[in-house]
Image: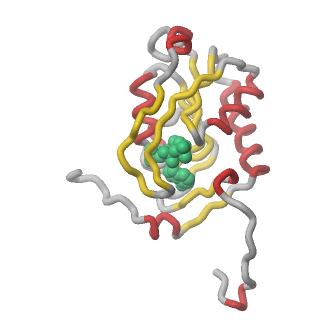
């Protein structure tokens, strides 16, 4: 689109890897909950799947919220973003709890990157509170509460997408 910064290539994005362990992710979700505790109470948590499912479970447990709904959106094929597809919308029951506009609902996702996914969900629930664990600068204005900001050219590797593997010693040319 005219005037917009060009999309970063997969190579450029992978240039700054930010691996997150399960321990770190759990700690960051708990830190997020501390902040959200000041904002709530919330009637329900809306997880943006799939990445939002893990933080939503941890946050809902800490906040004592037992109603959890999903909005299922797909856009990335690994690190390339395509058209956003809404595979499942918000349930009628959750919509009712949020008075039709999302008031008192908490949307949770693992991160905002370009902000396209977050923008789409915000349009569905304009009065909901939107929380993510991580935020990149382009998506940050869309989020109400987050924990860690990383640069736009960082690629976050989540523990559910990665596995431990051998890393060669530095003297053998490892970065
Ligand atoms: O701010 P954006 O540029 O829109 O990107 C952020 C979204 O991308 C990832 O989801 P993805 O579409 O990869 O699906 P997944 O959660 O099933 O992995 C991530 O979990 C966010 O939902
Ligand atoms: O940095 C990222 N990591 C994992 N998934 C993502 N989806 C958009 N950006 C990212
Ligand atoms: Mg996602």
Residue 152 placed where, x, y %? 47, 57
Q: How is the image coloured?
A: secondary structure
Residue sitting at 64 percent across and 43 percent down? 147
Q: Nearer the viewer, residue 65 or 37?
A: 65
Residue sitting at 66 percent across and 18 percent down? 67
Q: Is residue 45 left or right of residue 23?
A: left
Residue sitting at 43 percent across and 45 percent down? 75
Relative vertical location of residue 98 with respect to residue 159 in this rendering, above or below: above
The quadrant in which residue 155 appears is bottom right
| Total numbered labels placed on residues in the image | 0
Residue 39 visible from this viewpoint: yes
Residue 41 placed where, x, y %? 66, 16
Question: Which residue sits furthest front?
Answer: 87
Residue 112 visible from this viewpoint: no
Q: Quadrant of the C terminus?
A: bottom right
Relative vertical location of residue 69 with respect to residue 167 in this rendering, above or below: above
Question: Which residue sits furthest bottom?
Answer: 171
Residue sitting at 73 percent across and 70 percent down? 165
Q: Nearer the viewer, residue 150 or 168?
A: 168
Residue 16 placed where, x, y %? 55, 67
Q: Is residue 146 left or right of residue 75?
A: right
Residue 167 placed where, x, y %? 73, 77
Q: Nearer the viewer, residue 5 or 77?
A: 77
């Amino acid at each position: 689109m005219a005037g917009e910064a060009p999309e970063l290539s997969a190579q450029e994005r992978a240039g700054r890897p930010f691996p997150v362990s399960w321990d770190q992710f759990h700690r960051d979700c708990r830190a997020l909950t501390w902040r959200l505790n000041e904002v709530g109470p919330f009637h329900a948590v809306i997880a943006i799947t799939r990445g939002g499912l893990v933080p939503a479970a941890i946050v809902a447990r800490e906040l004592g919220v037992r109603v959890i709904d999903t909005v299922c959106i797909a856009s990335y094929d690994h690190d390339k973003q395509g058209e956003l597809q809404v595979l499942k919308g918000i349930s009628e029951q959750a919509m009712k709890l949020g008075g039709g506009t999302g008031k008192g609902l908490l949307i949770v996702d693992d991160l905002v990157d370009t902000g396209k996914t977050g923008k789409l969900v915000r349009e569905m629930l304009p009065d909901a509170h939107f929380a993510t664990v991580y935020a990149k600068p382009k998506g940050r204005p869309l989020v109400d509460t987050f924990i860690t900001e990383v640069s736009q050219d960082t690629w976050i590797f989540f523990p559910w997408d990665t596995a431990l593997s051998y890393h060669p010693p530095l003297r053998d040319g490892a970065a």
